[in-house]
Image: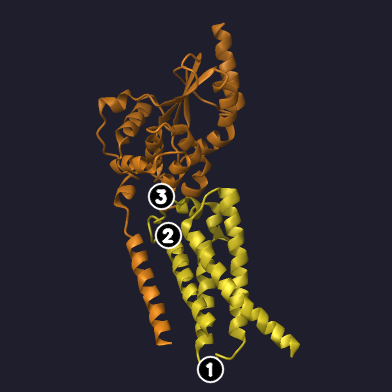
Chain colours: A orange, B yellow
Amino acid sequence: MKRFYALLGLVAVVAAVLIWKGSRPQTAALAASDSPRVTVTAADSAFRGFTLGSDSAPVEVVEYADFQCPHCGEFTVVQFPTIRDQLINAGRVRWRFRDFPIGGAFAWSRVSALAAQCAGEQGRFWEMADALYQRQSDWGRNPKNPSGTFHDLARAAGVDAGKYDACMDAQRYAGRLEASHQEGIARGVNGTPTFFINGRLHEFPRGATSDAFQAVVDSLLRKRS
Amino acid sequence: MRHRQAIALLALVGFCIALYLWMYKVGIIGRLQCGTGSCEYVQTSRYGALFGVPVAFYGMVGYAVIFAVTLAGLQPAFADRRWPTTVVAACAAGGLLFTLYLTYIELFVLHAICRWCVGSAIVITLIAAVAIPPAVRQTHGAESR
């Protein structure tokens, strides 16, 4: 019986050590959540965002968005699939994504944008953006640092985990985010999502629905013809 | 007696796994050590909590009850009593059903596997395998008398 209790004690001690080791903070991941002071290089400013659709599409929509913003999430999950099918895949629209990490109450704006950029480095930006929005209700309202969740989402999106981690730890694209954010401010963006259609800020007073986009694109194409 | 010792050991292991997942869920641990699994994807999904309480907490309570009852059953005063066997078998059966539900969610809803959840599933399956047969024999023995 003594051996049995000794074994129980051993299991408890080993478990306590493993849990303690596993609970050490991930400083790099935590630091990624807010790093407003970054150096913006010329390459950062030259990056024009990830695009979807044909280069020869007659209409270009530039979207400034924040992955933690609920309106952006709702737009992407509900409206964007139709826009993609009917306008982008049809060759009528080229979609350009620009980061506009709001920060403040959205504590994970930057780290989520970094995660998408790091996935984009491996050609998986849109898959990662989709995953971030699809799971936004899980991580966006959670005070816990979501870096681990993003890591899992990136892997599910087909990203090489080692390269992704290295990218995130180095905050490789923090400069890009800052450049995109500053560009948005300079263009008058003060909330997300904000859309520029063929270079002009476009407001959707009745909501940015797929029908509204369809109507704007139809109108622009009629003027061209 | 041997089977109660085995159950106590397994329940302690299960409790530690559930404790680890609960500590992550409430924010004490920043990141789960998961290897190639999708632990955080599973844990931060909407299925990571039930009625507002982390699923891992139910696991902690279940394993703690099994552990405490089994330890009590190992004491000389209760060694011949039937109720520890019955209570542990009932808890193990309930835990196994709950684990089957969670595994279904992982495989067919989330399409992601959390290694720690698999570890807990193995533990509760082993506990059920050890705890339920003696309870069934005990019930049949009582009926035939």
Q: Nearer the viewer, mark 3 or mark 1?
A: 1
Q: Amino acid at mark 1?
A: Ala
Residue A151's place in the image compared with B10, above or below, is: above
Q: Seen in the image, is A201 located left or right of residue B83?
A: left
Dot 2 crowding, Cα within 10 Å, few <14, some 14–19, many 20+: many
The alpha-carbon separation of the residues under discs 1 and 2 comes to 39 Å
x, y percent for residue A33: 35, 45
Q: Nearer the viewer, mark 1 or mark 2?
A: 1
Position of residue A203 measured from the top left corner of the image (x, y, whole percent)? 51, 25
Q: Is residue A23 visible?
A: no
Depth order, front residue of A211/A93: A93
Q: Amino acid at mark 2?
A: Tyr
Q: Chain of mark 3?
A: A
Task: Indicate which disc, 1 or 2, sits on the residue closer to the N terminus.
Answer: 2
Q: Nearer the viewer, residue A15 or A108?
A: A15
Specify whether disc 1 shares its chain with disc 2. yes
Q: Identify whether A200 is placed above or below B57.
A: above
Residue hosting label 1: B77
**Quarter occupied by residue A24:** bottom left
Q: Closest to the observer: A113 or A218?
A: A113
Mark 3 in CB contact with mark 1 (< 8 angstroms): no
Q: Pointer 2: what residue? A: B24
Which residue is denoted by mark 3 in the rendering?
A: A148
Residue at the image point whose x is 49% and y is 81% from the top: B5
